[in-house]
Image (tube, rainbow, N blue to C red):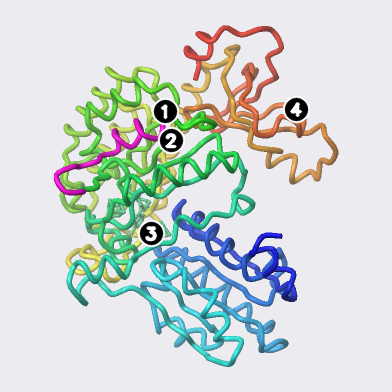
Amino acid sequence: MSESSQEITDQKTKHLYIETVGCQMNVLDSEMVVAALRKKGYAITQDPALADTILFNTCSVREHAEEKAYHNLHHLKQLKLQNPSKIIGVMGCMAQKDQNGIFARVPFVDLVVGPGQLHQIPDMIERAEQGEKQQLAVSLSRRDGTLEEIKRSHETFDPLRDPEMRPTPFQAYLRIQIGCDKFCTYCIVPMTRGPEQGRSPEQIVSEARLLAEQGAKEITLLGQTVNSYKHKDGDKTTRLADLLQMIHPIEGIERIKFVTNYPKDMTRELLETVRDLPKCSPYLHVPAQSGSDNVLKRMKRGYTVSDYYAMMDRINEILPSAAVSSDFIVGFCGETDEEFQMTVDMVRRCRFKNSFIYKYSVRPGTKGADIYQDDIPEEVKHQRNLDLLAVQNKISLEDNMKFLGKTVEVLVEGPSKWSVRKHQEGDLRQMTGRTACDRIIVWDGNMRQVGAIMPIRVTDVFAFTMLGEVETTEVLPEVFQLSV
Ligand code: SAH
Ligand code: SF4
Ligand code: F3S
């Protein structure tokens, strides 16, 4: 019997309820916290009423996400009153941003833990069990120490993994970069996640090997600006293209993706590496944020619209079959109708596979909040959001139409949302999967297909999904190449 299972059987099983919002970084962080707590004998429950510990992994990127977190926390009051020994913790970006402010707003919260202190959670829970109330563990803020001290306070504990916590065991995230130094004027992330740090290539590669051994076929490398990844060791500098070369030979890994990209760092060398390594997915998420130079300048994004178009030309030249997706913020401070129209033009010209469109949300603590007026009325933001989405959806649909009748190579993820909603049971289900280019496809299949990479023929398309059926005739590999 291994040491960890010994530990588990020796203790009463406790239950953890964990709720995660925000980006992939948070999904990964939750996976690690769960792994650490399982070692302490915890099992997961979907019911907060049955949980000994309740954790909320939070996001601060927009006000709405925070308000919802506070609202959900207030809802736990009754449970806490019924059972005062229940431990309630807030982790993630809102914990780092609001710190003691969380105890002020929700006094029955026991733990507030920033993204750089998650490894302390098991000990903090133990102390809470012994009666220690309102424990706070957060990183140094960006002004409270030397750069080295601040960096150290933002450490993560990535090597600890729990494959069972992943949405699917054969898909895994791998963090290659912590934090962000870009300081876009609207964005809170550099404050919540601290200075940009590239993890060491040795750690990354050994973690990729471990993930492959655990059955991961698809690995997604994570960083806020993943293609700015840099790690210096003496005079040796490792960049993302080098990492891809190092991970590519690992047996078992069949697809490698990376998000999120920063337009300025989408180098020719990186694109050529993606082209030359067959396991690298030609899928590039490169948020543009706006199609107006004036707005980009106010956002301090560090590139112009023509720089972005030059990058698109580079992508189209080197990776003609690539799918490019973007994020946009509408209604940023001072955005005129003309400036918004330039964003619409950009979407039309770049023909993104899809775009995530957000209404600007002022974030106290950012430069934007200090120096600009959040002066675009909510109705205008809302209308711009709808208008841009309509343009994007039409393009996504047209783009998907090209796949009608073609066969695509799909990594099968599991039963579709529809199947789950309809409580379909048994082996035969509607299944969902993704192409290497991140296109979602559903078909009538069976549970034995989960985790396989298989050919599906596209029979109908919508803006966000495609419908298909299993291709039964033998498919030549070139057909996949044509139709990813
Ligand atoms: N690091 C990534 C994105 C991080 S946040 C990048 O640089 O692209 C994800 C997205 O949220 C951003 O791309 C942006 O479109 C949006 N976002 C960030 N701050 C926001 C704010 N204050 N209001 C509205 N949307 C915001
Ligand atoms: Fe935020 Fe900009 Fe950094 Fe992305 S690059 S995390 S938008 S500051
Ligand atoms: Fe949100 Fe933090 Fe990610 S603010 S978007 S969870 S890095």
Alpha carbon separation for disc pair 3 and 2: 36 Å
Q: Which mark is residue 401?
A: none
Circle 4 crowding by C-alpha within 10 Å: few under 14, some 14–19, many from 20 = some
Q: Residue at x 45, y 74 (%)?
A: 113
Disc 1 + disc 2, Cβ < 8 Å? yes
Alpha carbon separation for disc pair 1 and 2: 6 Å
Disc 4 + disc 3, Cβ < 8 Å? no
Confirm or reject: label 2 Cβ below 8 Å from ligand 1: no
Of pointers 4 and 2, the one earlier in the residue sequence: 2
**Res 369 → quadrant:** bottom left
Rendered location of residue 459, percent (x, y):
65, 17
Rendered location of residue 483, percent (x, y):
50, 15
Residue identifier under label 1: 280
Rendered location of residue 324, percent (x, y):
37, 30
Q: Is 244 one of the magenta-colored residues?
A: yes
Residue identifier under label 2: 257
Confirm or reject: label 4 Cβ below 8 Å from ligand 1: no
Disc 1 element: loop
Figure check: 95 above or below 345: below
Residue identifier under label 3: 378
Residue identifier under label 4: 445
